[in-house]
Image (cartoon, helix red, strand yellow):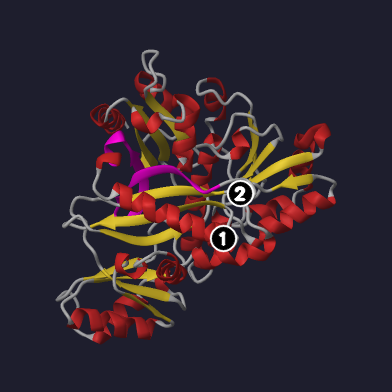
Amino acid sequence: MLNPTWANDTPIVVVCNTAEAYTSFFDPLLDRTIQAQSIFQVHTSSDRALFWLRSAKLVIGSLPLHHLAEVNQRWGYGHTQYCYPSTATPSLCRDILDTPELLQTIVSYAGESRAIQLIPYANTATFYELVNRLQAAGLTVYLPESPDLGNRWLRDALDTKLGFRSLLAQCLPEGAEHMPLGFGAVSIHQTAEIVSWFLQRARACIVKTNEGVLGWGQLVFQPGAVRSPADILTLLQSQPLLNHTSLVIEAYIDSPQHLFPSAEFFVPAPTVGLPYLTYVSNQLFCHGQFAGVLMSPDLAEQPWYNRLVTQGLHLAKALQAMGYVGHFDLDGLVDEAGRLYLLEVNPRRTGATHVHELACHLLGADYAAHHTLISQTAIATVHHTYSALVQKLQPVLYPRHGKPEGVIITHTSNLASGQFGYVAIAPTLIEARSLQQYISTNL
């Protein structure tokens, strides 16, 4: 099923406020250089908003990008427009509020109807300030992916590890049985004590920030690797991303087969309809950080698939009853014995919403039954210009040989730093892997 904004003629304005969703995570980073680098990396992920929803839309991101013409001309988004502030801060909505030209761009895009559908990456407090400003400018602002302001706290609560653990225990039958054993800690010293407790019982554990992003702010402890509680504390204190007052310590569950399934759902307002599944993927990680996803018809045949989807739909209905509106994904892990563990939800558009909506745009809503897609968000390249990158990838760019397969460049705002992102599309997993191999050997 597709988001209702696909069928609505009201102009769509996308505000890809990605870094804004994580300001509380970045604040404790005392090293401003590390903080700036981290925020820039998150900003670059906003390029994917070009592939959200339908072609006719205005996208506002934080950084200049290089592939808009290709997106418009080659991949069928001829009516997508893009703009960005002259100086990017962690808060894109604040940047828009402080830039009269961007505000006027939105007002002008509304046209004679004086109405827009405003679609955020995340429903932050500053996003609602932007809504108020646009309404004060005389626009009617529809929010098909946003809860009422009075229910916004629910998004914030869900966007924490501890909030998820509480939610799962309350909303899902036997929810606690699907979570790894875990505890919350309010200080680094208490965290060290809990880690020591796990290790004394010969159990590996993982320390996570209560509010995290892309797998950052995690540290695994294995039995026998650390000698004393003092050593544990020293190691924790050496990690700048763990300088948070709220941490979560969980039993570490290994997945030797690298199965990290994720299911995304859309929760409309109750008057619009029932929640529904958008996509299922296997998340890909590199050095513990989120790197992309795999979508394949084979996933639907996996033993964990029906349980993940069923649990997610049950959770989606509970969230709708509580007042939540918008996307969320339910992330899990499958251990060596095939048991599914549920780890967290992300209450916003997610790391593969663009892959799903791109596939719907190019291949049809039933793409998951007949095509495999692999996304990568930050692949290293020696080609720091878009023209050089395209020249190298020309033989495999979508559509390849006139067929619905090939590579689509999705991220270019990080090209100057030697990275880019893409989605590989093919009829089979073997062919999709072949496209990946071509990229890795030519870049």
Side of 131 relative to 366 (left or right): right
Q: Amino acid at mark 1?
A: Ala
Q: Nearer the viewer, mark 2 or mark 1?
A: 1
Residues 434 and 142: in front is 142
- Magenta: main secondary structure: strand
Residue 147 is at least partly visible in this image:
yes
Identify which amino acid the numbered label 2 is placed on: Glu
Residue matched to label 2: 145
In the image, residue 222 sits, relative to residue 119, either above or below, namely below
* Label 1 Cα neighbours within 10 Å, binned few <14 / some 14-19 / many ≥20: few
Task: Establish if 193 lies above or below 83.
Answer: below
Where does the image place residue 125, in percent across and percent down from the top left? 66, 62
Residue 299 x %, y %: 29, 41
Left-right relation of 339 to 126: left
Which residue corresponds to the image point at 19% horizontal and 71% vertical from the top-left?
Answer: 222
Specify whether 319 is left or right of 352. right
Element type at marker 1?
Answer: helix
Image location of residue 389, percent across then percent down: 41, 28
Residue 401 counted in the magenta span: no
**96 or 387, which is in the foreground?**
96
Quarter holding residue 197: bottom left
Element on which disc 2 rests: loop
Q: 313 and 436: which one is in front? A: 313
Which span of residues is magenta-colored?
274-299
Residue at label 1?
A: 321
Is residue 411 visible in the rendered image? The answer is no
Which residue shows up at 60% across the image and 60% down it? Answer: 323
- Quadrant holding the C terminus: top left
Which residue occupies 75% across, 49% down? 99
Q: Position of residue 418 (x, y in %)?
A: 41, 41
